């Protein structure tokens, strides 16, 4: 996620560090590089223009704080400005003061709208909310069946339209049905089209009038780039949009949509989809995403993800290990079984501090079979004391796992790098964590 943009930012930071001190010349060069990085990431031009102007103004007017290097302050400013353009802080879902909250989910066909409804239901169910899923998409083949399957997987309820072909009547029937139930949320999956058209907008407007939803969420496909924002603007102008679910963010190496939505549309991103599984939907936290982009990691989201996936007891154990930066290969092996539940290894590693330095570690889930084999070929002592694995031991581990010695070397090296990065962030006092994050550049 955002690999290309993250790499370019890191190149800028390394350039500043290499200059030794901040001057008007290298500030101009750094800001120019930041501007090009954002434009190449497909960020809206006006957003880029305002962003670089704000960064330059702050850098030039910044007093150098004692014990903090100029390049560290530059990174801090970039982090704060990235957070600013994405919305400062997360915005919660609107909730009815009394009774059931109605959510209307809209978007074009192919954006992952129906799957997003299932993911949102799963997320709310995990928060002990009672959820009902409803489909008003009577045109797309198997749309109702797909949502029914997702509802079952999410442990949510499903409203069967029983052959009704009028979306508005389905909404009326649901309203009558819910009156006698105690659902916390009812999520309506609406119809989409391959292209925007007047009949679709008319249908959605009629549904909105009847339903009076507490919130309308637009599902944006981040892979569409700036065209996703044009579609979102059209939906907002026709029916009104309260928030955005940014989908397929795991496949977006550039990140232009995520950095443009709030400024261009004026609506907050409320959730982001990071995979195909139901668990792969996260509440959108601008500050945390800014940290991920800059390679600072996101331990808070990682722990939240672990709690949601593997339970509080195991997550607490995992959190303590991360905080103390004393993971060993027994812990790593213990966690491998949870990787599939939590998402891809690549996404999980991206949440660790110094993630940009872990790119050579095998992140293909198929390669995890080899990683597990190498760890199982270690003795219990070796797993608990990785630093004691000498060349002869490495040869034995490689032979026992059916791998090459260079694969064992790479695993050990990257494992140690990960531990060092975690230690660098967690060894200081909480007020110094940001400073420690910056210092790794």
Image (cartoon, grey):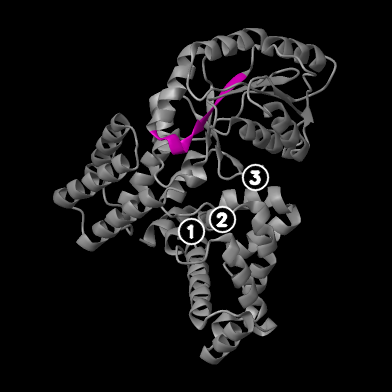
Q: Which residue, given by chain and number where applicable, does mark 2 sit on? A: 348
Residue 122 x %, y %: 70, 38
Q: CA distance from mark 2 to mark 1?
A: 11 Å
Secondary element under disc 2, as helix, strand or loop, is helix
Residue furthest to the bottom in view is 392
- Is 37 in front, or is 199? 199
Rendered view: 192 above or below 375: above
**Which picture quadrant has residue 310?**
bottom right
Mark 1 Cα within 10 Å, few/some/many (few <14, many 20+)?
A: many
Q: Toward the viewer: 301 or 165?
A: 165
What residue is pinned by disc 3? 277
Task: State which mark lies toward you, 2 or 1.
Answer: 2
Q: Quadrant of residue 48?
A: top left
- Badge 3 element: loop
Measured as percent of width and height from the top left, residue 298 is found at: 52, 51
How many C-alpha atoms fall within 10 Å of the one at disc 3: few (<14), some, or many (≥20)? some
Region in magenta: 215-225
Q: Earlier in the sequence, mark 2 or mark 3?
A: 3
Task: Give the percent coordinates (x, y) of residue 364.
Answer: 54, 61
Which residue occupies the extreme front position in the image?
141
Tag 3 or tag 1, which sits nearer the N-term? 3
| Circle on res. 20 | none
Query: Which residue corresponds to the image point at 27% horizontal and 51% vertical from the top-left?
Result: 64
Real-space Cα separation, disc 1 to disc 3, in angstroms: 25 Å
Up-down: is 393 above or below 412? below
Evaluate if marks 2 and 3 touch, with contact meaning CB atoms under 8 Å apart.
Answer: no
Q: Which one is in front, 397 or 15?
A: 397
Q: CA distance from mark 2 to mark 3?
A: 14 Å
Residue that protrudes farthest toward the left in the picture: 25
Residue where numbered disc 1 is placed: 353
* Residue shown at 61% from the left, 52% from the top: 343
Q: Which secondary structure lies at badge 1?
A: loop
């Amino acid at each position: 996620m955002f690999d290309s943009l993250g790499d370019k930012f890191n190149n800028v930071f390394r350039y500043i560090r290499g200059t030794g001190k901040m001057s008007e010349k290298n500030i101009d060069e750094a800001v120019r590089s930041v501007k090009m990085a954002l434009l190449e990431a497909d960020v809206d031009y006006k957003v880029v223009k305002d962003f670089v102007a704000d960064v330059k103004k702050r850098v030039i007017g910044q007093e150098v704080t004692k014990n903090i290097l100029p390049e560290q302050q530059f990174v801090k400013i970039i982090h704060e400005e990235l957070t600013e353009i994405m919305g400062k802080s997360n915005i919660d879902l609107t909730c009815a003061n009394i009774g059931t909250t109605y959510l209307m989910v809209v978007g074009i066909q192919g954006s992952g709208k129906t799957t997003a409804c299932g993911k949102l239901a799963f997320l709310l169910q995990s928060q002990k909310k009672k959820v009902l899923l409803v489909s008003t998409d009577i045109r797309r083949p198997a749309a109702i069946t797909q949502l029914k399957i997702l509802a079952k997987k999410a442990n949510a309820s499903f409203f069967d339209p029983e052959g009704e072909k009028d979306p508005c009547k389905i909404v009326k029937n649901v309203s009558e049905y819910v009156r006698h139930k105690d659902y916390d949320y009812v999520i309506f999956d609406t119809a989409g089209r391959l292209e925007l058209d007047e009949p679709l907008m008319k249908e959605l407007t009629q549904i909105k009038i009847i339903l009076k939803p507490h919130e309308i969420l637009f599902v944006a496909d981040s892979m569409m780039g700036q065209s996703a924002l044009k579609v979102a603007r059209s939906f907002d102008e026709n029916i009104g949009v309260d928030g955005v679910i940014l989908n397929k963010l795991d496949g977006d190496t550039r990140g232009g949509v995520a950095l443009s939505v709030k400024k261009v549309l004026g609506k907050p991103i409320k959730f982001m989809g990071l995979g195909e599984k139901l668990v792969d939907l996260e509440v959108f936290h601008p500050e945390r995403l800014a940290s991920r982009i800059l390679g600072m990691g996101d331990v808070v989201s990682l722990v939240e993800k672990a709690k949601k996936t593997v339970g509080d007891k195991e997550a607490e154990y995992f959190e303590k290990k991360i905080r103390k930066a004393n993971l060993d290969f027994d812990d790593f092996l213990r966690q491998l079984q949870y990787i599939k539940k939590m998402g891809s290894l690549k996404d999980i590693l991206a949440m660790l501090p110094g993630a940009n330095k872990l790119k050579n570690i095998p992140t293909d889930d198929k390669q995890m079979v080899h990683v597990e084999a190498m760890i199982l070929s270690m003795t219990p002592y070796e797993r608990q004391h990785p630093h004691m694995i000498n060349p002869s031991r490495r040869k034995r581990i490689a032979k026992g796992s059916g791998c090459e010695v260079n694969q064992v070397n790479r695993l050990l090296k990257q494992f140690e790098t990960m531990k060092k990065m975690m230690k660098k962030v967690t060894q200081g006092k909480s007020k110094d964590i940001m400073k420690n994050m910056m210092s790794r550049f």
